[in-house]
Image (spheres, grey):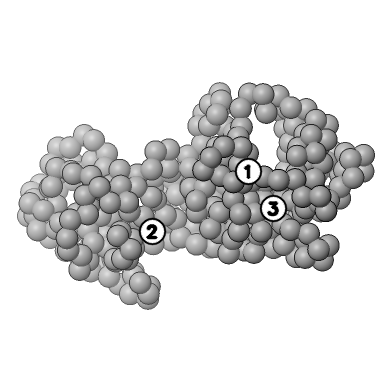
């Protein structure tokens, strides 16, 4: 799969003369609703003898302006591209988003971007898709403009699981509530936080549980304080473990941290890139009266985590 964009490190997009099938949207978290849209895109592209392209944004639009508050990230662009490749897409375009782009009206977007820049013969969108200045346009308006500028529009209905509508907002709510075990039901995969290992206060080492202190990727959604069963990949190896998010109140620490105790791990991971996959929340954060009581609880947490992770292959 090719990865395009306006600037390096992305490839330069060359307008295909025969046209292209394009999936439009932010695809935040690439949940099961997005996956349904992309599968339709790939299938329809093959029917028409066209390549398929996902057209999305390099940055979340709300994080460019911030007027309504920033949106926490739940996936890197690298991971988004990997998932799209797994779904069979031929290419993904990460569009830059700035004030000039945001000011574009609906017709200019359809004429200059969809028909002009991309040369789309088919656009596949969700029923809640919006475009143009202030989100003025939706599937209906895009379909009308398609008649004028020579492209078709296929509209995909939302995906519901049980009585819940699958959405990026729902995924963020699950993370915020610590319901990481429910996240895969709607996303199709567990929640992962990327980061880098740094030197910490080495509190875990002092009570017999060596931990990796993690600096999460800036802007990522962090689950609430507590203890989680996790699987962590570092230096190409995956480890089962326990991750603590919080301020270590037993030791009077005021700075929030993410620390992972990796089962059966050895060696120095300082400075290494790390990915922590959250499987289950075990408990909330507790302040203990002594380091000994904390150590005893961590031993119990480890047993609970081993049980929660017992069916996971590394």
- Labelled pair 2, 3 in contact (Cβ < 8 Å): no
**Can I make out residue 293 in this image?**
no
Give the numbered dot on residue 277: 2
As helix, strand or loop, the secondary structure at mark 3 comes to strand
Pointer 3 local density, CA inside 10 Å: few below 14, some 14–19, many at least 20 = many
Pointer 1: what residue? 12
On the image, the x and y values in percent for residue 48 come to: 83, 62
Q: Is residue 141 above or below residue 105?
A: below
Label 1 and label 2: CA atoms lie apart by 33 Å
Q: Residue at x 55, y 59 (%)?
A: 83
Do residues under tags 3 and 1 come within 8 Å of each other at their CB atoms?
no
Q: Which quadrant of the structure image shows residue 283? A: bottom left
Q: Earlier in the sequence, mark 1 or mark 2?
A: 1
**Residue 188 position by quadrant:** bottom right
Disc 2 from disc 3: Cα separation: 29 Å
User: Where is mark 3, residue-wise?
Assistant: 53
Please name the residue shown 27% across and 39% down the image: 256
Q: Secondary structure at mark 1?
A: loop
């Amino acid at each position: 799969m090719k990865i395009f964009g306006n600037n390096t490190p992305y490839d330069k997009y060359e307008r295909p003369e025969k046209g292209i099938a394009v999936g439009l949207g932010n695809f935040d978290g690439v949940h099961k609703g997005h996956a349904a849209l992309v599968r339709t895109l790939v299938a329809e592209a093959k029917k028409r003898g066209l390549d398929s392209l996902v057209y999305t944004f390099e940055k979340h639009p709300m994080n460019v302006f911030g007027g309504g508050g920033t949106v926490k990230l739940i996936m890197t662009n690298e991971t988004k591209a990997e998932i799209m490749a797994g779904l069979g897409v031929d290419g993904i375009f990460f569009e830059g988003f700035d004030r000039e782009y945001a000011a574009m009206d609906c017709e200019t977007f359809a004429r200059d971007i969809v028909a002009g820049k991309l040369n789309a013969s088919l656009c596949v969108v969700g029923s809640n898709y919006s475009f143009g200045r202030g989100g003025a346009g939706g599937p209906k308006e895009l379909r009308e403009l398609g008649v004028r500028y020579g492209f078709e529009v296929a509209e995909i209905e939302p995906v519901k699981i049980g009585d819940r509508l699958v959405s990026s907002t729902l995924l963020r709510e699950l993370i915020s509530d610590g319901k990481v075990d429910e996240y895969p039901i709607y996303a199709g995969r567990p929640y992962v936080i990327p980061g880098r290992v740094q030197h910490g206060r080495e509190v875990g080492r002092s009570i017999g549980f060596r931990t990796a202190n993690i600096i999460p990727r800036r802007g990522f959604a962090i689950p609430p304080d507590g203890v989680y069963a996790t699987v962590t990949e570092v230096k190409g190896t995956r480890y089962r473990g326990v991750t603590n998010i919080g301020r270590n109140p037993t030791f009077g620490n005021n700075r929030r941290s993410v620390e992972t105790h990796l089962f059966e791990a050895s060696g120095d991971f300082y400075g290494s890139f790390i990915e922590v996959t959250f499987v289950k929340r075990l408990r909330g954060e507790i302040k203990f009266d002594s380091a000994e009581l904390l150590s005893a609880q961590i031993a119990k947490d480890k047993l609970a985590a081993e049980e929660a992770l017992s069916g996971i292959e590394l």
